[in-house]
Amino acid sequence: MTRSGPSISPPSTPGPPPGHRPDLDEAVETWSSMNDASILRSVAAVILGFVVLTLGSVLTGRLLLSLFGVEPEANPGAAFIFTSLGVRLVVTVLAGLLTAWAAPRAPRLHAGVLAAILVFFSLASLAGLSMSGDPYGPAWYPIVMLVAGPVGVLAGGLLRPRRR
């Protein structure tokens, strides 16, 4: 026997409105919920990391030059090169950690922004060295720093403990 009458269908679940883009909508919502102080703190966090990175590299570089007795025009030895590489890697990790620590939210994203800035400046420096035709130290050193620097910054960003 069949029943005649209104058929019961499962209730339809409302879908997203037309034109809904979850990633973009979420980004816009996050951006709009940030206040001016939070945006300034984000910018300040990246600037802090960049200043630590720049000053740390310059100051440790000068210190190592004097400790190893290397003249600016002289070809540095292997001990100087590898010590410089290690010290600068520590500086990049510290810069990434401080950037992530100072970030108001998304600390790893802030460290990623600093790493991207470092890649840009490293590429510019590498281009300048190749155009001058007279690299200081071995040719592989700036290439290693192009990779190791951003990796160090990202590692420093990962060292920051998560907030609860």
Image (spheres, rainbow, N blue to C red):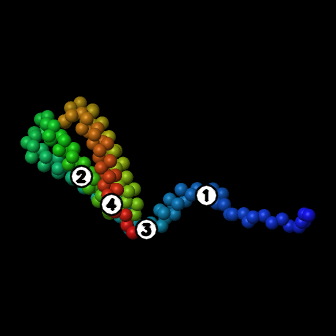
Tell me the amino acid under the disc marked 3: Asn
Q: Position of residue 84 (x, y in %)?
A: 18, 44
Q: For the view shown, which residue lies furthest in the left direction?
A: 69
Query: Residues at badges 3 and 4 in contact (C-beta under 8 Å)?
Result: no
Q: Which of marks 3 and 4 is in front?
A: 4
Q: Viewed as shown, does residue 119 lie left or right of 88?
A: right
Identify residue for label 3: 35
Instruction: Identify which amino acid the numbered label 1 is placed on.
Output: His
Q: Quadrant of the N terminus?
A: bottom right
Q: How far apart are marks 1 and 2 (CA)?
A: 44 Å
Q: Which badge, 3 or 4, is on the more N-terminal residue?
A: 3
Frontmost of labels 4 and 1 is: 4
Residue 160: assigned label: 4
Residue at screen point 21% across, 46% down: 86
Q: Residue 20 carries which label?
A: 1
Counting other residues with Cα less than 10 Å from the Cα at mark 4, is it few (<14), some (14-19), or many (20 or more)? some
Task: Kindly indicate whether the residue at mark 1 contacts the one at mark 4 (C-beta within 8 angstroms).
Answer: no
> Horizontal placement of 22 versus 157: left or right?
right
Mark 2 or mark 3: name the one nearer the start of the chain.
Answer: 3
The CA distance from mark 4 to mark 1 is 35 Å
Distance from the alpha carbon under mark 2 to that under mark 4: 15 Å
Q: Indicate the quadrant where residue 47 lies.
A: bottom left
On screen, residue 24 above or below 145: below
The numbered dot on residue 119 is none
Residue 152 x %, y %:
30, 49
Work out how far the residue at label 3 is from the one at label 4, CA to CA, in angstroms: 24 Å
